[in-house]
Image (cartoon, helix red, strand yellow):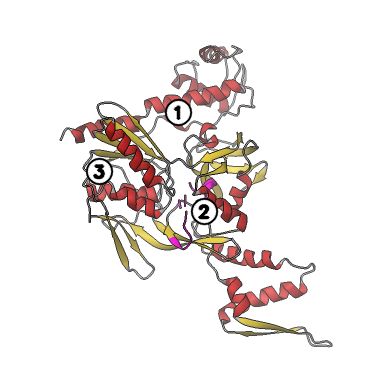
Amino acid sequence: MNEENKEELEGQHMAEETETKSSFLRIKKFHFAMLLFFLVFLTAGITTFALAFGEDKPAVQVIREREEFAKLYDAYDTLKNEYYQEIDQEKLINGAIDGMLSALDDPYSDYMSQEDAKNFHQSLSSSFEGIGAEIQERDGYISIVTPLKGSPAEKAGLQPEDKIMSVDGKSLQGMSTTEAVALIRGEKGTDVKLSILRQGAEKPVDVTITRDTIPIETVYGEMLEDGIAKVQITNFSQNTATELVDILNDLQKQGMKGLVLDLRQNPGGLLDQAIKISSLFVPEGDILFQVEDRNGNVEKYPSENKNGNKLPLVVVIDKGSASASEILAGAVSESAAVPLVGEKSFGKGTVQRAEDFSDGSNMKFTTDKWLTPKGNWIHKKGIKPDYEVAMPEYASLPFIDPEAELKVSTASEQVKSAQKMLKALGFDPGREDGFFDEKTKEAVSEFQKSKEIEQTGILKGSTTIELMNALREQLKKDDPQVQKALEVLKQEMAK
């Protein structure tokens, strides 16, 4: 999500990617813009200025081959000659391109400067530096699509649909994803303060995150029980298909008899990787997905499976599963009857192409729709799983600011959140109404004791961080979606 900017994005969103001039999908991870304005400006005509004096006003005579650009040329010439300061020609041209793409009102079409384009390409390779979160502009706000596995963003507790209100005090409202990424990314070891508004929270909370190198390792596998393996794909980068095959081969050597494929919080990525991976699980010749152009022409993409693999499979999705991960989920569901477990997916049903300009800047723009094997367009709808399973309430609790001091007599939404976290972890605070009383203090002290932290009974700093980390680990252990996937998979294996 296509850096759709990956940031980062820290994308970029996590969908969305690119090889120059090749189709790809991604959640607004990244941006490009479509306009040959610079080329047209150089080649389409010659502008001659005739300055007259006296009663006549300055006249501009333009010889053009493309009359649709007349207004654009007039605006440029007027600014160049009459603006009160000398203009930056390159900045104006880039702004015109950016403006035209913004006018498409398409969150997946955007222009990127040389530096942004460099970061975008880097995010699809081995690593990049930042916080490790896929973001997207939505309704005038910058929202988290998904944090990358093991990233500073994940460790800080960022979740899909969190809104980033500001970065280091600078408001992001009205900014493009590219502009937001430029503020969020930075060198390893540096801090960035994000103001985060979570759904259901009354006001945003400041979260300080230390940037780090974000390795683009995209596949994680482990053996669970009864010959069942679990593999998580975090995004579709350049080497994801190869990584997956290597891990599956290793798991087979360990006795894998069934597979849970986890696509949760996967913002998408490169289309060719989605094709290769989907082909592993769909019989040869069966349709993976379809692409429809602006004229209604449809091209079908069949599975390239050569190994006839019939490994029992269940796929887990959620609202952070987007773009290429939705292609995979749709392909195995409709062409291989693979059960889907979890929550409805994000809903990105368009295809983008990325192209570089000669100066190193580039643009991404939407070229087609993609459809499921049965011709369904899931854009803004998502894919509904066969078994809908929600995560526990505590999985989406608002942040607690580590810099805030929560103690006896404090009353706030953050105290309420802390009380619910403590209860979920087995440290009963006695109440969950947001008032910090003696019973809540006792629960905090017991938690501190369990983590070998000084027992002050006050929530602040390391205690707050440990509390949120413990909750995340508890969620991994409970994980009702994976538990349901295991149940369904065992039924599939028994057939």
Question: What residue do we see at 48% from left, 42% from top?
Answer: 216
The residue carrying mark 3 is 338
Q: Label 3 amino acid?
A: Val
**Element assignment for label 2:** loop
Q: Which one is in front, 275 or 133?
A: 275
Question: What residue do we see at 38% from left, 61% from top?
Answer: 369
Decide: is 161 above or below 69: above
Q: Label 1 amino acid?
A: Tyr
Question: Which percent across, then down, holds residue 36?
Answer: 56, 71
The residue carrying mark 2 is 30
Question: What residue do we see at 47% from left, 49% from top?
Answer: 1
Outermost residue on the left side: it is 495
Question: Which percent across, then down, holds residue 56?
Answer: 79, 87
**Around disc 1, counting alpha carbons within 10 Å, would you say few (fewer than 14), some (14 to 19), or many (20 or more)?**
some
| Marker count (numbered) | 3
Outermost residue on the right side: it is 54
- Inspect this view and state whether residue 8 appears: yes
The residue carrying mark 1 is 394
> Does residue 2 belong to the magenta stretch?
yes
Range shown magenta: 1-22
**Around disc 2, counting alpha carbons within 10 Å, would you say few (fewer than 14), some (14 to 19), or many (20 or more)?**
many
